[in-house]
Image (tube, rainbow, N blue to C red):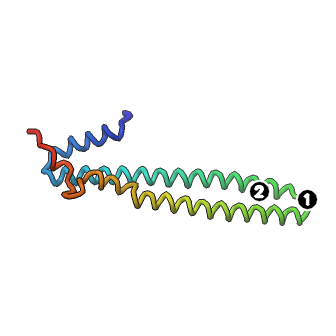
Amino acid sequence: MPNRTKTSEMEAVSAFADRFPQQYGTALVMMSQACQGYMESALKLNQEMADFMRRRLNEDVSFGHALSSAEHLEDAVSLQQDWMKTASSDYLAETTKLYEICMEAASNGWMNGVAEAGDGETGNKTADKPRES
């Protein structure tokens, strides 16, 4: 698959949109930009969740190894308490991180595609361009 830039993709969408009546072309550009923003936000969210799960699984495996080598009950209890504190802290921090990613996506992430496609007044950026015959 050819490596395409965001600009070239948007130019292709705009060129395709120019073949339609003006309102359809604008809607197509807006929808394309919003979908692209949504997919970028979803990718960022999924990458963060996968990274977190990898980190937590590594911690859990390390805990399992340490627990299985504990010689005394007190050592095992101490290891379990430390693991629980760390896991709770990690999950709380990750929840905050995921919340921030979602809020960023909702407030200025994928909705920017819709705002960029419109001119703020008519919501129709391509209406200001002369149509080529």
Mark 2 lies on a secondary structure that is: helix
Which quadrant is home to the N terminus? top left
In the image, 15 versus 70, the foreground residue is 15
Which percent across, then down, holds residue 39? Answer: 40, 51
Specify the farthest residue to the left: 133
Residue at 21 percent of width and 41 percent of height: 15
From the viewer's perspective, tell me whether residue 17 is left or right of residue 107.
Answer: left
Which residue appears at 79% of the width and 53% of the height?
Answer: 65
In x, y percent, where is residue 76?
85, 63
Q: Disc number at residue 41?
A: none
Identity, as a three-letter code, of the amino acid under mark 2 = Phe
Which residue in the protein does label 1 denote? Answer: 71
Image quarter of residue 86: bottom right
Q: Secondary structure at mark 1?
A: loop
Mark 1 residue crowding within 10 angstroms, few (<14) / some (14–19) / many (20+): few
**For the view shown, which residue lies furthest in the right direction?**
72
> Which amino acid type is marked by label 1?
Glu
Q: Residue furthest top?
A: 2
Q: Which residue is pictured at 68% across the width and 65% down the height? A: 88
For label 2, the residue is 63
Residue 115 lies in quadrant: bottom left
Badge 2 local density, few (<14 within 10 Å), some, or many (20+)? Answer: some
Q: Is 48 left, or right, of 66 in this rendering? A: left
x and y, in percent, of residue 51 in the image: 59, 51
Quadrant of the frame with the C terminus: top left
Q: Are marks 1 and 2 in contact (CB under 8 Å)?
A: no
Determine the CA span between mark 1 and mark 2. Answer: 14 Å
